[in-house]
Amino acid sequence: MQIIACVNWCCFMSWGFWVQLFYQDYQQLSPILTMVRMLPMFVTGLLCNVVIALVIGHVDVLFIIVTGTLLTSVANIFFAVIKSDASYWGFGFPSAILSVFGADFVFATGTIFIAKICLPHEQSVAGALFQTMTQLGTAFGLAITTIVFNRVLASQSRDLGVAVNDAGTNAPRPAQLKAYQAAEWAAFAFGILGMSLAFFLHGVGIVGHPGPAKPSTDENEKTLTPDDEKV
């Protein structure tokens, strides 16, 4: 579960980082307009937390983790194949909706799973380790996808006859687009790796508590016997 959380954060945080740069640096949008395009994440995130609270005590952890990591991976595909003239409603909007599923599903399920398998005096340390793995995922994901971006940007610019500078500000727009796509493909690979690792959770079952059992009606509605009447 720790490794799944790590690679899922590689996928999710890399998506957010490169999407913001795509909007601001490639499409030359202002920070406000970029923020507006990310608003679906807020709404979906709230709904995901409500859904996970309702299903965590009834649905197998394998299904929850696979669904979350898969949907976040799909969010990266939209920008991995995006075109320069692509519509926001066709690419950016559905991608923003799907991106948060992995973070919300994996984090909520993972913390409950950690609390369930650890002894009471170990839960704080285990929870801290889980959070540390997500932060490491952020660091590794951004570092690796940045390497991919820079390599592809330099290679594509060279093919177009441009020696890109250290800041990459003179890179041709076609080369920039290819670099953004490559970074998103790298993030997608992290998400698929997390989904693949989730299958090792087969047999874990339900990690949440289904809630208090309802009192049986058979016990409350029994017929009085002659002995009961004497009492």
Image: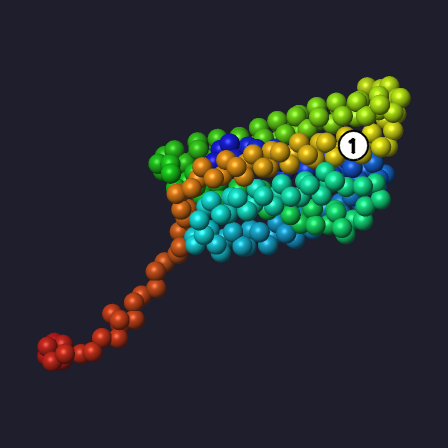
Residue 65 percent across, percent down from the top left: 51, 44
Residue name at image x 64 percent, y 43 percent:
74
Left or right relative to 31: residue 8: left
Residue displayed at 88% across by 21% down: 162
Question: SS for tag 1?
Answer: helix
- Indicate whether 104 appears above or below 150: below
Identity of the residue drawn at 65% across and 34% down: 187
Viewer can see residue 92: yes
Where does label 1 land, which residue?
178
Query: How dense is the environment of label 1, judged by Cα within 10 Å: few (below 14), some, or many (20 and up)?
Result: many
Q: Picture quarter containing residue 220?
A: bottom left
Q: Where residue 210 sits: x, y (%)?
A: 40, 55
Residue 102 seen = no
Q: Amino acid at mark 1?
A: Lys
Q: Is residue 41 above or below residue 179?
A: below
Where does the image place residue 134, in percent across and percent down from the top left? 56, 33
In the image, taking residue 176 as reference, residue 119 lies left or right, namely left
